[in-house]
Amino acid sequence: MELALLGGAPVRTEPFPSWPVYGRREEQSLLSVLESGSWGGYNKKVEEFETAFAALHQVRYGVSCANGTVALEVAQRCLGIRCGDEVIVPAITFVATASTVLLCHAAPVFVDIDPVTLNISPSAVEAAVTPRTKAIIAVHFGGQPADMDALQAVARRHRLALIEDAAHAHGASWRGAPVGQFGDAATFSFQMFKLVTSGEGGILLTDSEALAEKAWAYCNHGRRKDAGWYEHFALGTNYRLTGFQAAVLIAQLDELAAQSATRRANVAHLRKLLSSFQGLRLEPDDPRVTANPCYLIMLRYDPAEFGGLDRALFLQALQAEGVPARPTYPFPLYRNPLFRAANLASRLCSEWRAPQDYASLNLPESERVCRDGIWLEQNLFLGTTRDVEDIVAACEKIQKLAARLTVAHPAGESAKIK
């Protein structure tokens, strides 16, 4: 037996399930919009999808928009986030969670994550509150809901707005209640890799009629639903979802429950197989999470159990064995060039100031997960238990033969391997 990276036969040659998944339902739904002659954001399917998605999450109002980034921006604008305000965000998340704060001329305050859930740490949030703090954005990372009990308590105590960034968490639930109803607003993404997708798209959910009306107006050039087309009551823009996107999303939504159940079952199988495996750790489930759609599965890698093999070389070996795993973010969000002082400061607004020295910030759990984290994406778990067993078999093979890699490719040479 030889490692595939060294010329041996790979554990797996057939592809894992692909994404996105589509079928006859999407085709028929798209055709109905095509034939209707109403292709834009006022097609009846847009409102049909908004109603269905809000109902799934047991929230009164859904306002669709162009993408998840826009949804975050709209949520903050409609909650009154403005120049000089501070918004607390996790350091492990996609850039939009923080860049939309800047778009509203406010300042992101990065806090550390919980080492088990990878979600924003409520105690870190509490410690970061200042007189300028106006909101918390809680990301349900990988599909696992954040600690909404603790975060709601912090928000109430300090009279802060609470926004759920649920881009990964379609259909997730906390203590039996779907995410999307714990904050003042929640936002979801329908980008191509998300669990419900139309290529791009987003939605804002809220139980507040006033907030929903503001959001709808902002996405529709300041119009009101009860007024004329050329009557504009507030500053807004065109952030609408199209009828074609809504058509696809309606069909996609029908498959979410079954797909999530398949993923959960396969991830449970992975957890069982890894329970006695040293070197790759899958953190335990939080019993308060009653539904996790498993958007990203995070493994923690211990090189000591692989003969000192660094993570980059391990991943190259794993990919060669036919398992498309990848590393987590290369660094916490605050290390991005966007947050360097020269790119910010007074150009945002006259009252803007950095609440942290982003360049020197060091949040230990966020730094650690960027060093030892490995992601397995959701589509790998849409197949059978054999797919899961192949993932573990590839890891076991690499562990058994790791010494051959360390001899063939000494430290520092992993980047040369193709």
Image (tube, rainbow, N blue to C red):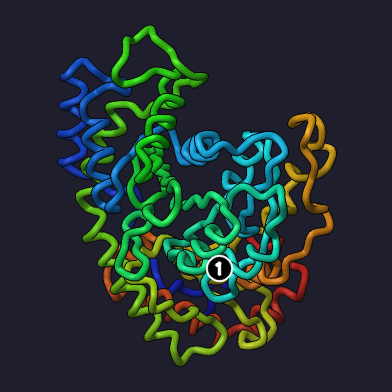
Towards the viewer: 290 or 34: 290
Instruction: List the single residue furthest toward the bottom.
Output: 276
Q: Position of residue 349 (x, y in %)?
A: 75, 30
Extreme residue in the top direction: 230
In the drawing, does residue 330 fall left or right of residue 93?
A: right
Q: Secondary structure at mark 1?
A: loop
Whether residue 364 is situated above or below residue 377 in the rendered picture: below
Q: Is residue 376 visible?
A: no
Which residue is tagged 1? 118
Q: Quadrant of residue 260?
A: bottom left
Asked if residue 41 lies left or right of residue 255, the reply is: right
Q: Residue at x 57, y 53 (%)?
A: 159
Tally of numbered tags: 1
Query: Could you say which quadrant of the image residue 373 lies in?
Result: bottom right
Q: Residue at x 52, y 59 (%)?
A: 156
Hey, what amino acid is under mark 1?
Leu
Relative vertical location of residue 365 with respect to residue 137 in this rendering, above or below: below
Quadrant into which the C terminus falls: bottom right
Residue at image point 45% right, 72% down: 10
**Against 87, is 393 above or below?**
below
- Residue 70 image offset from top left, x and y in percent: 49, 35
Position above or below: 57 against 363 = above
Q: Nearer the viewer, residue 379 or 122?
A: 122
Q: Pointer 1: residues within 10 angstroms few (<14), some, or many (20+)?
A: many
Measuring from the top left, give residue 61's x and y in whole percent.
Answer: 31, 40
Residue 292 pos. (x, y %):
36, 66
* Camera-nearest residue between 229 and 336: 229
Asked if residue 204 can be seen in this view, the reply is yes
